[in-house]
Image (cartoon, helix red, strand yellow):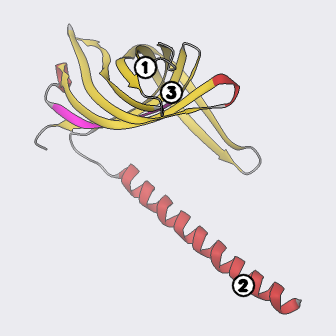
Amino acid sequence: GKRTNLCFARELFHVTSAMISSALAILFLFAAVSNAQVDDVDSFALFMTGVCDDHRVVAGNCTLKGNSQTISTLISPSDAISFSVRNHIGSYAQYLSTYQVDADYNIVETGTISFGIHNNREHQISFSLRGKGYPGPKGVNWGSMAGEVTGGQGVYQNYQGIITVVGGQDGSREFGLVSGHIWPKGN
């Protein structure tokens, strides 16, 4: 009766308090990392769209494009989350890749991202990714991949780093969030 409800309420309070404490610790850590000044590290996040060969095949190619943009996520108590991308006039990035998918939807992908042409030089990084695909509702295939930046050209010559891609494919239309952190080798 009342004792069981009281025990349950105390347990719920402790679990809720622990979850809030953990969430606040993660939030403060994220804020500290976000505000940290890291010399020689370039970071990027782009929402890109384009076309890929159908992911139901064993191998294929992708071509995606992302303009200069502002990405925002709004978290509100009534609507949960909303995501928006505002494109700006200016240079764009192009994502070119070759991928392989096995019967269990494991993905291996290699390619390049070019960040415009400046002073007659293409600024480009090369990458190698591994990840997993997931068949989703309404015929959309979803996937997430992570990997490394293996080199570059232009201002990114002799660079290394990390990169992630999270996105979906609806027929041949591909869309996704591509993000990474890159820095000169040896730093």
Q: Residue furthest bottom?
A: 3
Residue depth check, mark 3 versus mark 1: number of the one nearer the observer: 1
Q: Element type at marker 2? A: helix
Residue beneath the point at 30% across and 17% down: 114
Residues at badges 3 and 1 in contact (C-beta under 8 Å)? no
Give the CA separation, mark 2 to mark 1. 54 Å
Q: Quadrant of residue 157?
A: top left
> What amino acid type is highlighted by mark number 2?
Arg
- The quadrant in which residue 107 appears is top left
Q: Which residues are magenta?
A: 159-167
- Residue 58 circle label: 1
Residue 20 in the figure: left or right of residue 79: left
Quarter of the picture holding the N terminus: bottom right
Q: Is residue 163 visible?
A: no
The percent position of residue 177, horizontal first and vertical second, equals: 48, 30
Q: Earlier in the sequence, mark 3 or mark 1?
A: 1
Distance between the alpha carbons at the discs numbered 3 and 1: 20 Å
Return the mark for residue 10. Answer: 2
